[in-house]
Image (tube, rainbow, N blue to C red):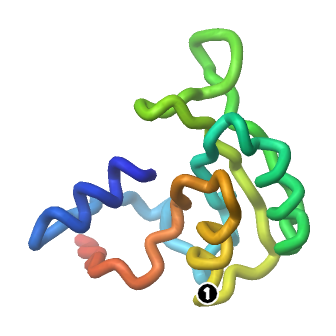
Amino acid sequence: MFAEKLVIKSCSENYILVDQSKFVSRLGEKFPVPVEVDPRALHLVETELTLLNAEDIQLRMAVGKDGPIITEAGNLILDVRFNEIPETFERDIKAIPGVVETGLFIGYPIEVLTT
């Protein structure tokens, strides 16, 4: 998520291709919010996300190897389900010490084109 946001902010135009399965009426309806976390802060972040009313928190596990997925920067990914995701949520989650980035792209200049 951190790398993706660096690219988005560095480019004047961005294109994201999605299929119909990604369309929802509200954020969090089908997919959990990914949260990139410094491994040293994993338990702190889980506790703080619970205080933000997280319904379910899962460490994202690798498929082709044992253990969790580790990002290019050496961080872990939590998949977090919330019943509601308000406009301030990206800022609220990123305010937790140890959170590197979120998979929320609230306020980014992204245009979705469909065919």
- Rendered image quadrant of residue 39: top right
Above or below, comparing residue 61 to residue 27 in the picture: above
- Provide residue 6's location: percent of width, then percent of height: 28, 57
Q: Amino acid at mark 1?
A: Thr
- Seen as rendered, the residue at the extreme bottom is 87
Q: For the view shown, which residue lies furthest in the top direction?
A: 65
Look at the image and tell me in which quarter the C terminus lies: bottom left
Name the residue located 62 percent from the left edge and 36 percent from the top edge.
76
Count of picture labels: 1
Pick the front one: 112 or 83: 83
User: Image quadrant of residue 91?
Assistant: bottom right
Picture layout, residue 39 above or below residue 47: above
Q: Residues within 10 Å of mark 1 (few under 14, many from 20)?
A: few
Left or right, 85 with respect to 5, comes to right
Q: Position of residue 82 (x, y in %)?
A: 78, 70
Judge by depth and name the residue closer to the eye, 5 or 22: 5
Query: Is residue 100 toward the left or the right of residue 47 in the image?
Result: left
Q: Which residue is mark 1?
A: 88
**Which residue sits at x=41%, y=31%?**
72
Q: Specify whether 61 is left or right of 36.
A: right
> Tag 1, which secondary structure?
loop
Residue found 58% across the figure and 48% down from its top = 36
Q: State the residue in front, 20 or 110.
A: 110
Q: Where residue 68 appears, x then y in whole percent?
A: 67, 25
Q: Quadrant of residue 84?
A: bottom right
Query: At 44% across and 71% down in the image, what residue appears?
Result: 105
In the image, residue 11 above or below residue 61:
below
